Image: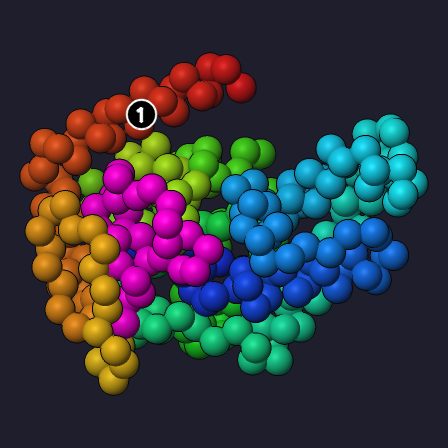
Amino acid sequence: MVSALVLDCDGVLADTERFGHLPAFNATFERFGLPVRWSETDYAEKLRIGGGKERMASLFGDAAFVAAARIPDDPDGRAALLADWHREKTARFTALVQAGALPGRPGIRRVVTDALAAGWQVAVASTSAEASVRAVLAHAVGDTAAARIPVFAGDVVPAKKPDPAVYLLAVERLGLDPADTLVIEDSRNGLLAATRAGLACLVTVNGYTRDEGFAEAALVVSELGDPEGDPIAVLADPLGIDPGHEIVLGDLRRLLAARAASPHTASLHTADENTAAATKESA
């Protein structure tokens, strides 16, 4: 078995939510003449919902919107509308990425390049549309590295994060050893998805997620960082990794080793596995 690094896309590869997805959603609403525009505060609430189509579908719960936008009552009609909206939104988001409006987050290209060079398996697991994820990945890490990285995204699984389905699928398809696999996420929903799949998780927060709860994380930092940039801020370090100016591959190796040896972390994962089982039974 080789070590594996599985990355979320939005907020991990790039700061896509504020500068990519939100403007793409609002431009789509305008294009279709829909009587809604999401502010940054509105969108922070929508981020609690996993998946772009699911966020758009939440509009159907607003009776005033449904009446004003003349939304059909039948499920097939609504599904067709969502598909049209989401295609437009994905195209607008991808155009922003290709225009260079969403540079990779600090350290992401360096860490991914180092992991690939060291023989790690690197993958991406996201609830966003696959076309969007692949565009962000290529711009964040470069075309050469991106070509070596499998992507699990969009509707590849029926349940979105915090359900662990996308991580369980990545582990199964790639033949990963969960004990030697590290996830990098940026939100509580992503953290829960990773830990419920039995995987260690490092969290790199962003402006939308900094105040969320990350008690289950193996390490919480402001960003991965780069040697030429500002030092990272360590927000939680329950395993005593004690990273330096920036996160390096050695930190990730120590994190996996420490997590495997930590009874505290093991108990957290046992609790989460029980939660996941209960969630699955009630679904």
Q: Place residue 251 in its image quadrant.
A: bottom left
Identify the residue at horizontal 48%, vertical 76% (top origin): 103
Q: Is residue 146 left or right of residue 82?
A: left
For numbered disc 1, what is the local secondary structure?
A: helix
- What are the residue bounds of the magenta stretch? 199-225
The answer to whether residue 116 shows anywhere in this view is no
Q: Main secondary structure of the magenta part?
A: loop
Q: Is residue 277 magenta?
A: no
Q: Amino acid at mark 1?
A: Glu
- Residue plotted at (34% across, 32% down): 196
**Quadrant of the rendered structure where residue 252 is?**
bottom left
Q: Is residue 122 left or right of residue 246?
A: right
Where residue 181 sits: x, y (%)?
Answer: 26, 47
The front one of 106 and 233 is 233
Q: Residue at x 81, y 61 (%)?
A: 30
| Residue 91 x, y percent position in the rendering | 71, 64
Spot occupied by residue 71 in the image (x, y as percentages of width and height): 88, 39
Q: Which residue is mark 1?
A: 273
Magenta region includes residue 224: yes
Q: Is residue 46 above or below residue 250?
A: above
Give the left or right position of residue 147, taking residue 86 as reference.
left
